[in-house]
Amino acid sequence: MTLKLRFDESLFLILLLIIFIITPIVQTADVKSFCKCVCAENSTIVSLNIDQTCSDCNRANCINQMKDLCAGGRNEEGTSKEGCEIQVIATCFQRDSYKDEVIVYLYIIITSGLLLTALTKPYIEKWWKKINSPYVYSSMQNN
């Protein structure tokens, strides 16, 4: 007995194989992290190095980055007012992820593939029926 796959089953198996191949690539993608520091009315966005994580985005790091930008937290002599550290807000966020790009491209590819399949399905079915005719004739032996 031979295993004969239908066209829909083989297409499903190909898509499943592609998903299993791409998944490890997406999981190992690097993500670019940024640290947004807000002090009084001023804010700045600092790109974190690859070896830094979001835990490095804290108030101490922001105060270091925004030495002169924290104008609302300084008095007339230029020294920090008491409580300037309390005014600093640090927020970490990630952008430009390869995972996001792969998801968007996969969505576009799968949607285009489904549209192409829907458009060509009648022609493929005609071709498939012509190749796999249900009426197979064989010659009979002479007795």
Image (cartoon, helix red, strand yellow):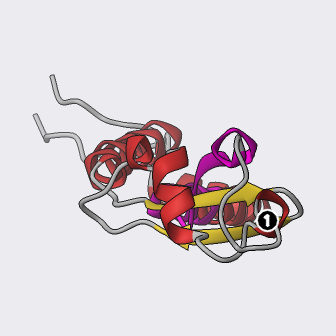
Report the residue marked by disc 1. Answer: 119
Number of callouts in the render?
Answer: 1
Residue numbers of the magenta segment: 84-107
From this view, report whether residue 7 is shown above or below residue 117.
Answer: above
Q: Residue at 46% across / 56% down in the picture?
A: 61
Q: Residue at 30% across / 35% down in the picture?
A: 4
Amino acid at pointer 1: Leu
Q: Residue at 31% across / 56% down in the picture?
A: 52
Q: Is residue 79 left or right of residue 98?
A: right
The quarter of the rendered structure image containing the N terminus is top left
Q: Residue at 34% across / 60% down in the picture?
A: 30
Q: Nearer the viewer, residue 55 or 21?
A: 55
The quarter of the rendered structure image containing the C terminus is top left
Residue 25: tell me if it is visible. Answer: yes
- Is residue 91 rendered magenta in the image? yes
Q: Residue 33 at x, y = what percent?
A: 48, 59
Q: Residue 13 at x, y = what percent?
A: 37, 40
